[in-house]
Image: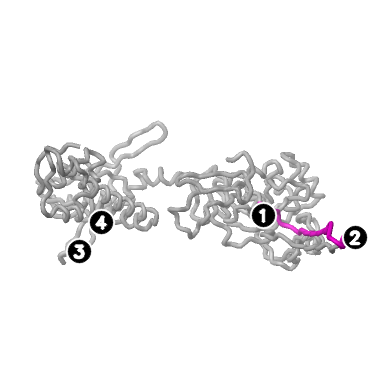
Amino acid sequence: MSDTQQSADDHGGVPVGDIRFYQAIIPPLPDGNYTLRARQTLDGLPGAEPSPSIPSVTLPFAVRGPRFTLNPADINSYFPPPSPPTPFEGQLPHVVVARKTLPWERLLGPDLDQGIPWLGLLVVDEDDPGGIPKVHSGTVADLLRDGGKLPPGTIGPALRTGDLDDGESADDPCSYTELPADLFASIVPRLADLPFLAHARGVDTGNKPIEGILAEGIYSVVVGNRVPHGSAVNGAFLVSLEGFGELLAGQADEEAAREAADGATTIRLAVLHSWNFQMGGEDPFDVLMSADHSGLLAIDPPAVTEVKTGANCTQQAITVPAPDPSSPAFVEETVRYARQSGYAALTHDFRDGGQTFSWYRGPVIPCLLGLVLNEDQSNPVFRTADSLLRYDPASGLFDTGYAAAFELGWLLALQSEGFVISLRSYLHQAKTKGLRLVNRQQLTAGPFPLNLPADGAASIRNGVVLDAVVRWLAIPGADALQAALGSTASTGEVTS
């Protein structure tokens, strides 16, 4: 995180793959009312004694931003999600806001530094006094101390009608919630804590869809100061702390905050965003990949046959016996083996119009299958899904698992605009380098020239050279090109 506060314009592009943290991005002017006075004087005009006076000009204006409500479109994302139960215990909730300066656009109090955020993320669970509070719809008047809408024993922010900025009204819509004063005093961040609970971050968004993420790549984050309850339902409330400076000045002393509440039993706060969530107690990857759970992915789950104990966990290994082609019950054993290994029999339409059924197994079942390759394919390159169809001559059936995974990966890759652009750029560069390689003098002259066939140019355009350049990464380029054209070119030795 940066050691210094940044101005709203003091940022640059973030390199791909990097993330940049800002302690705060301070706008040039905080929200509020301002007066601009302009005065002009004329001195030394010939024949003008005394110099003429020009009346000064006064121009009032206001800098307005979110105060009592927030545009839902400004909420980029939030964590933990509302459902299902999130399994990351011990993590602090947070809200990502598209306005990079939002936490510092207002002053928490008239005498407080602008680097102290005016927003806080409060976390309340159902076991707290009063449970998770409800969010009420009302107006700004429900918060003002001279609005006449605060019940006895309830206080809101230290704001009155005269504290509203130009363009704001007590009749403006506003959502609010109420917390018991003791609970508020025990969970609200102190002034010294607030600067550590908000920051800005910048990332490169070149390879990310604009939808759902700020195109500029810089946004603000407000973090809660309370770890959620591990087994109860929690509520997160992004609230305005403007006007509560006295209640927060007690630092870690909760009694000082209670005294500042003047005997109030309830605190009313403006809510800009809220959601409920529940934490889970288990890591889903460890759980789902255990034998007890992954076996459920099979149509006919097998029994656990072996138990292995590790340093920190117990793993159960599933062993499924492979079918014996010489067994009289080979067909039944094949079907049972496939079902217990997570395969399903699906209709398979061939490209020539034929139809059969083949085995399909999803990619999330933890079972490693050996991929049968030719002897010269130690590092194979597959260009089509069909090249990954695995055929079992004993049963006469295809395994389509790898082919389906290839097609899924292909579609996911093409969905990424950044990947497609990079791929096209790479192919163009590879073809260009291949053509240059062919045209180099050492390939067409010297004591051992490379004699290209008459249709060598066509072979180059059809991808022969492209394949050679790909292999260039592993073996010398000239040898790769010679191997690629070996069926039609001379076998003369090439020097480079």
Mark drawn on residue 239: 1
Counting residues from the start of the chain, the first of labels 2 and 4 encountered is 2
**Residue topped by disc 2:** 50
Secondary structure found at label 4: strand
Viewer can see residue 335: no
Counting from the top left corner in percent of width and height, residue 41 is at 82, 58
| Label 4 packing within 10 angstroms: few (<14), some (14-19), many (20+) | some
The span from disc 4 to disc 3 (Cα, nearest Å) is 16 Å
| Label 1 packing within 10 angstroms: few (<14), some (14-19), many (20+) | many
Q: Is residue 226 left or right of residue 378?
A: right
* Residue type, label 4: Ala
Q: Quadrant of the C terminus?
A: top left
Counting residues from the start of the chain, the first of labels 1 and 4 encountered is 1
Counting residues from the start of the chain, the first of labels 4 and 3 encountered is 4
* Residue type, label 2: Pro
**Residue topped by disc 4:** 344
- Residue 48: within the magenta? yes
| Label 3 packing within 10 angstroms: few (<14), some (14-19), many (20+) | few
Secondary structure found at label 2: loop
Name the mark nearer the viewer: 2 or 3: 2
- Residue 429: within the magenta? no
Counting from the top left corner in percent of width and height, residue 477 is at 22, 41
Mark drawn on residue 349: 3
Identified at 50% across, 52% down, the residue is 85
The span from disc 1 to disc 4 (Cα, nearest Å) is 52 Å
Q: Residue furthest right?
A: 50
Q: Residue furthest top?
A: 311
Q: Which residues are magenta?
A: 27-52
| Label 2 packing within 10 angstroms: few (<14), some (14-19), many (20+) | few
